[in-house]
Amino acid sequence: MKLTKHGFTLTELMAVVIIIGILAGIGFGSYQKAIERSRFSEGLAAGAAVQEAVNRYYYENTDLSDGSKDCASKNDYCVRTKYFEVIVNNTGRVYAYHMKGNTRQLYYLLWLPSFDSSREGEACVPFGSNTTEGVDFCKSMGYTVQLGSLYYKP
């Protein structure tokens, strides 16, 4: 009588588990980057809407002199979304800070209004202790022209 073995050896199972672990590790990094890219578009939309409102207000009133506001003081010049805190300061600049809970993370988006004396437009700015990661992220989103700490699209 001939005996036939059915199943897999422990070595074969371990090889499969290791391969699946490596693939999952690579996929998780890509997944995290894709999530951050989708959140980035939320910040762009929120900041652009606020910037448009600031421009309209400025051209009608020409006075933004009542000081800078922030979300901590719960003033009219701040908007919170799920992942961003959008602040308008007294010069009409709009800042969209990427947030995790109550902590600013990785980068922020900045809109310089047309009446500002510096360069007009939208910029991505690396933030805080994650500066190299922030720079890499800003560049991956197409902001490659550097002026000081600001990154603009070409």
Image (cartoon, rainbow, N blue to C red):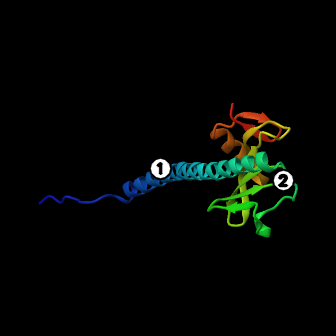
Depth check, front residue: 122 or 138: 122
Residue holding disc 1: 23
The x, y position of residue 109, in whole percent, is: 71, 48
- Quadrant containing the C terminus in the rendered view: top right
CA distance separating discs 2 and 1: 53 Å
**Sequence-first tag of 2 and 1:** 1
Q: How many marks?
A: 2
Residue at the far bottom: name it: 73
In front: label 2 or label 1: 2
Residue type, numbered disc 1: Leu
The x, y position of residue 134, in whole percent, is: 71, 47
Residue type, numbered disc 2: Leu
Figure quadrant of residue 84 = bottom right
In the image, which disc is placed on residue 64?
2
Depth check, front residue: 128 or 5: 128
- Quadrant containing the N terminus in the rendered view: bottom left
The x, y position of residue 48, in whole percent, is: 66, 47
Residue at the far front: name it: 60
Residue at position x 72%, y 50% from top?
107
Answer few, some or many: residues within 10 Å of disc 1's Cα (few below 14, many 20 plus, some between 14 and 19): few
Residue at position x 73%, y 42% from top?
123
Figure quadrant of residue 17 = bottom left
